[in-house]
Every structure is written in C-alpha cells, then in structure tokens.
Image (cartoon, grey):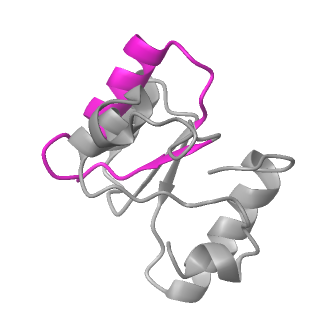
Amino acid sequence: MRRACPLAGVENPLVVVPNGVDAINYLAGAGAYSNRQTHPLPRLALLDIKMPLRSGLEVLAWIRSTLKSELPVIVLTSSNQAADIEKAYQEGANAFLVKPGHPEQLVQMMKGIKSFWLAGTTSL
C-alpha cells in the first residue's frame, strides 16, 4: 500500500496502524492518537480482515456502532471466502476487494479507489 498509493497518484496521506486495537484508537482519537491535528479522522478506511489483536471485521463493527459516521469502509483483504464477504457487508462495509497478487494490479486497484472514493478529499 505504501508503494501503490503514490504510484496510483493517491496524494491523500496514508496512515498505517499495526493492528486492530490501534485502528480503533486512531479512529477514536484515543491514546497516542489523541491529537486530531496530528491524527485527523480519515476520509476512507481500508481494513484487512486478518489484523492482529482485533480483526478488520471487529474494527468495522466498532466503526458502525460507535462512530455512527458515514466513513466509507473498504475491506481490502486476501480472503475471497463467501462467509467473509457476507459478514463484511452485514457489518456495513461499503466495498469488499480481494487483494491482487501482483503489485501492478494493486496500483490499478488504488487508481480505481482514488477515482471513486477519494475524488476531492484530502486525507485517506
């Protein structure tokens, strides 16, 4: 993602957190992420299902139940299992994308995300 975004022309800042607990803390503005000037709310969340500590689906459920926001959430994961796709949409995902196997395909996917989800926004 760190390479694909610039190659896709995504100029929005990319924030990467190491696990689901940090994702929730970032979105909640808690702990190390409490300064909203340094850590602003994103315009789009990309979640992997298989994050450590809290899964992407748990983070998604937290977003929809706690933030009550219109934050677009894309589940971007290696899983293509029907149960994962169904659960993601049940929890309120806006889109479910399977990570491509080749870096160039990821760049193309990010170009699509940019044109559809990030047009006119300033942060990711």
- Taking the spot 62% from the left edge, 51% from the top edge, the residue there is 124
Position of 26 relative to 3 (above/below): above
**Figure disc tally:** 0
**At 56% across and 36% down in the image, what residue appears?**
41
Q: Quadrant of residue 90?
A: top left
Residue at x-position 58% and y-position 78%: 4
- For residue 25, what is the image quadrant? top left
Q: Quadrant of residue 70?
A: top right
Please give left or right for residue 89 compared with residue 13 in the image. Answer: left
Residue 55 seen: no
The one of 85 and 6 positioned closer to us in this rendering? 6
Which of these two is toward me, 40 or 66? Answer: 40
108 in magenta: no
Vertical relation: 110 (above or below) 115: below
Position of residue 26 measured from the top left corner of the image (x, y, whole percent): 39, 39
Residue 63 point in image, percent of width and height: 42, 24
Residue positioned 74% across, 59% down in the render: 114
Q: Residue furthest left?
A: 53
| Residue 12 picture location, percent across and down | 69, 59
Is residue 59 in the magenta section? yes
- Regarding residue 27, the answer to whether it shows in the image is yes
Residue 104 position in % (x across, y down) = 60, 87
Q: Nearer the viewer, residue 119 or 40?
A: 40
Start-end of magenta stretch: 44-72
Lateral position of residue 59 relative to residue 19, left or right: right
